[in-house]
Amino acid sequence: MESKDLFYKQQNIFETISEDEKKASDAYCEDYMAYLQVSKTEREAVREAIKLAEKEGFVEFKKGMSLKAGDKVYKNVYGKALYLAVIGKQPLVSGMNIAGAHVDSPRLDLKQLPVYEDSELALLKTHYYGGIRKYQWVATPLALHGTAVLADGSVIDVAIGEDDGEPKFVITDLLPHLARNQRKKSLDEAFTGEDLNVLIGSEFDNDAEKGEKVKTRILKILFEKYGIIEEDFLSAEFEIVPAAKVTDIGFDRSLIGGYGHDDRVCAFAELKAILEETAPEKTAFCILVDKEEVGSEGVSGMKSMAFEYFVSNLFEACGETKDLEECFANSFCISADVTAAYDPNFPDVFEKRNAAKANYGVGIAKFTGSGGKSGSNDASAEVVGKIRRMFRDYGVVWQMAELGKVDQGGGGTIAKIMANRNIPTIDAGVPVLSMHAPFEVVSKLDCYMTYKAMKALYAEK
Ligand code: MN
Ligand code: MN
């Protein structure tokens, strides 16, 4: 063996990619960007995924259905999570190839009584969701998306601030001229959760009976346009999200900027891969799940029994004796979630030898967690070995991805939740710059390689 072959060399995809594959990558990313633009909330991400799935022949699963190899079904989990399956040639008991991504992203939720007036301006109180850096949400255009259940039980969906010509919203920031005290504070103290109040209007309603003329004007508009009264906010889920559009980044257009790459960039990779599946050997299973950013709790989160329930339903529909334990033990799962890309602006927090880099392919995180790998499933050598073989055979460019330096912080994904079900699981996803910011950046080639990784998974025998 030559000495150069003794070394492991990471590969920038640009060094080797063919013209044809570059074209395929650009085409794939165009589809992804279109998906991301209309998927700013978990509900929208699910709705859009269903639309795309139905176009490819997927049907909503109903109890009592009977299914055979090649059949394509989906299960809508409370409108906030989605499972898709293409039934394999082998029985379910021999296991499934599962890819799991999440479709919720960090944001500002409206409080249950959000509307108020202060100093003749109308504002909304918010409660942040997931890990945000609060200073990033001020002085930037915002949109309001969400769902309200009205007193008569009817449900309305709103999305305001996306289309050209629609009004947007903003959280005001302090002018530098008066920030002498604020700038001496730490970031955590300078920007608190209760400061993230969204400006929504200033016009008077002169017929208002009591003093709140601006709030009255806003409530009248809400009623006229959407049929909402203040009490309806109690049974609503409204989310404040960045109004920025998904766009190419860079003179060479090699990157994508947008809100919510974490984790819709992996969700779309899985989705696209399963939509193209026809007759897999093992059942292909795609999870788009909610609540990952807040610990995967609740009925629409990955800890939910909704997963077991649906797999049980599939056993019944396939005419197989239900054996979830055996099915899980024989399954394999990629927890498709983003990782941090090495950022030359912040070299101190990364360990360069083990950090993922943009354009080096899908990032495999053997473990997540923090401190001494606390809270991580830490995939086994055997599992990583399987990934190595799988990706090599399918031409997937990939890299190892450690989130940051030891003891710098940490994070978690749904990997451990799947692994706790006795499903061998590993994290794989797109490296992201500015992760969790209102505007995140990914490399197009990494997006494409993540999609290829999902295809490789579903092709596993
Ligand atoms: Mn994530
Ligand atoms: Mn995240």
Image (cartoon, rainbow, N blue to C red):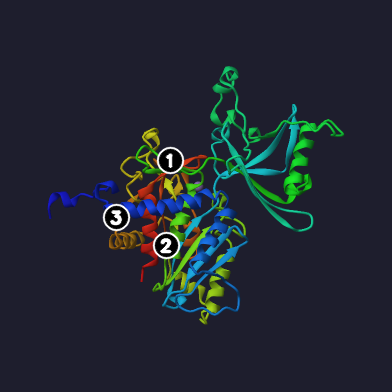
Can you name the residue that lies furthest to the right here?
Answer: 209
Residue at (60%, 75%) from the top-left corner? 63
Q: Furthest residue to the left?
A: 2
Find the distance from the CA under tag 1 to the CA under tag 3: 42 Å
Q: Name the residue under label 3.
A: 20
Relative image position of residue 204 (x, y in whole percent): 78, 31
- How many dots with numbers? 3
Q: Name the residue under label 2.
A: 273
Most foreground residue, 338 or 33: 33
Picture coordinates of residue 206 (x, y %)? 83, 31
Q: In this view, does 175 lie to the left or right of 221?
A: left
- In terms of sequence position, does the residue under pointer 1 or pointer 3 come before the other? 3
Q: How far apart are marks 1 and 2 (CA)?
A: 36 Å
Check disc 1 and give the amino acid type: Asp
Name the spot of residue 152 as percent of width and height, x first: 79, 57
Q: In this view, does 165 lie to the left or right of 376?
A: right
**Element class at badge 2:** helix
Question: Looking at the image, which residue is at 53% across and 74% down?
Answer: 314
Image coordinates for residue 203, horizontal then vertical, percent: 74, 31
Depth-wise, is mark 1 or mark 2 nearer the camera?
2
Which element type, helix, strand or loop, lies under badge 3?
helix
Q: What element carries label 1?
A: loop
Query: Which quarter of the rendering shows the C terminus?
Result: bottom left
Q: Is residue 398 visible?
A: no
Residue 393 seen by the camera: yes
Residue 221 shown left or right of residue 42 in the figure: right
Would you call the spot at circle 1 few (<14 residues within 10 Å), some (14-19), or many (20 or more)? few
**Of callouts 3 and 2, which one flags the residue occurring earlier in the amino acid sequence?**
3
Give the distance between the C-alpha atoms of the residues marked 3 and 2, in whole angstroms: 19 Å
Which residue occupies 48% across, 51% down? Answer: 34
Residue 407 is labelled as 1
Type of amino acid at the residue the image marks with label 3: Asp
